[in-house]
Every structure is written in structure tokens, then in C-alpha cells.
Amino acid sequence: MDRTEIKTPFFMVNTKSYLCKEKVLEIAKEADRLAEKYDITVFMIAPHVYLGIIQKVTNNLIITAQHVDGNYLGRGMGDTVPEFLRDVGVTAAYMNHAEHPMTLAELVQAIHRTKETGILSVVCSDTIEETKAIAMLNPDIILCEQTNKIETGTLSDNDYMKKSVDTVKKINPSILVELGAGICSGEDVYKTIMAGADGTGSASQISCSDDPAAVMEDMLLGVVKAREELEL
């Protein structure tokens, strides 16, 4: 599978800062196997220091950074410059997550720089108003998730999900919409995609599980179920 090809509906696996190298690699390898088994585009989001290793031990994942800065090469102690990510095989990057927010100016510059370097941009949004503003910047993917729902085990209601999708698609139909927060099961994945999402994902439910492989497979089966019903 081309690591930059996005088949919808897609799925994102995010280990955030829950796990260290050994367990992150275990999850990445299993995600890689499942991506191939079910022919699903799977984004693997992990700490920056492990991304190059993940790229070397997998074949089917879109390797994704948890954050990217919009700076150019040069001065900038501690910055994550897009070229650094590209050099280790990263092909996508998150921006403006609720746990790593960015100013509008920072976001504009970071999206510009990812376009310059060929890295897919995944921009997080909370409210419908914020989603509308971000859609005007034309990122590749907008992750719409209510901050107060993150890691609560409670999905956003259908009204929020449908309004989020409609808001983005009216501005630019080519922007993919991910709906997240509170995804706990394959059934949640199914409901989210059936609400109009191009994709969804999970972090703590996978990373903090006693059996991450089983949780991932259940969630990917939710993708398969929705894909078959929608005839995608």
C-alpha cells in the first residue's frame, strides 16, 4: 500500500505519551498487519522519537507525527521542522490538538510548510465555528472532536457530527473529515462513519488496553461494516 494513499473510511491509531518503545512498536506492527488484512488506510501516530523506527518495521501505515511546527531550517531550538519528519519517513502530521494547541498564525504557517514538504496535514478542531475557520485554510484532514469528550468514553451526538461534516464539505468537499473523541468500540467506529465521517480513530482505548490488538481489530471491523453498508 502506498503510504500516502488514503482510502476512506480510514482509521487512526494514536499512542500519545502513554507507552514507551517496546509497546509502541508492538501496536504499530499489529496495526500494520490489520491494515493489510482488511485493506484499510491506517494512520499510526506516535512520539516523534519512535517514528523513524516504526517506518522501518512496517509497510502499510501512514506514519504520523503528533505535532509539527511551521518553521524553516535554521534557528529554532526544539522545533519540529517538517523536513526532519520527512527525513525519517513521516508522511502526515497532527496540528492543533487540544493537548498541544496552536495559535492561528502558527497553524497557518504549519499548514503552508507541510504543503511545501509533501506532508499530509491533520488539523484538530473543537467547535463548529473553529471547524469553519480551519476549513478555510484547506488542510488535508480536519479532526473534529469536542474537547470535553476526549477520553470520556462518550461519543459526540449526531447533531455535532453531522454539522461538522456539512460545515467542512460546504467549504471544500476535498477536505477529509475525521470524527473523534470517545471512540471505545467497533460499534462506535461504525456509528461515527455512518454519521458521515471519512474516518475516525482511537488513542487511550487502544494504548491503555490489556489487549490492544483485540481492541484494534474490533474497531477496524467497525470500519469494514460501515464500508460494506455504504458500498465504498
Image (tube, rainbow, N blue to C red):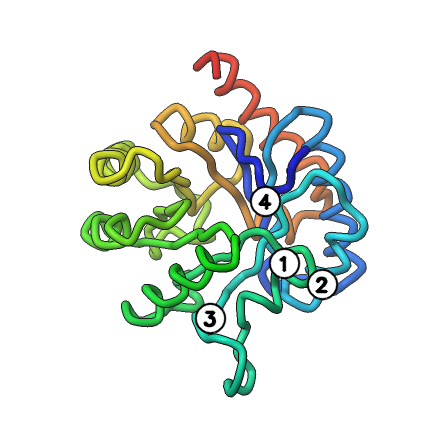
| Residue 46: mark in rendering | 1
Q: Position of residue 69 (x, y in %)?
A: 46, 71
Disc 1 + disc 2, Cβ < 8 Å = yes
Q: Amino acid at mark 3?
A: Asp
Disc 4 element: strand
Q: Residue under label 4, please give it.
A: 43
Q: Position of residue 149 (x, y in %)?
A: 37, 51
Q: Residue under label 2, please give it.
A: 50
Estimate the spatial distance between the alpha carbons at disc 2 and disc 4, rounded to whole Å: 14 Å
Query: Callout 1: 10 Å neighbours few (<14), some, many (20+)?
Result: many
Which numbered disc, 4 or 3, marks the residue closer to the eye?
3
Disc 4 + disc 3, Cβ < 8 Å = no
Estimate the spatial distance between the alpha carbons at disc 2 and disc 3, rounded to whole Å: 18 Å
Q: Position of residue 103 (x, y in %)?
A: 30, 71
| Residue 79: mark in rendering | none
Residue 108 vertical placement versus 220 (above, below):
below
In-image side of 95 versus 170 (left or right): right
Q: Amino acid at mark 1?
A: Ala
Q: Amino acid at mark 2?
A: Tyr
What's the residue at 64%, 41% (across, down)?
Answer: 3
Q: Residue under label 3, please give it.
A: 69
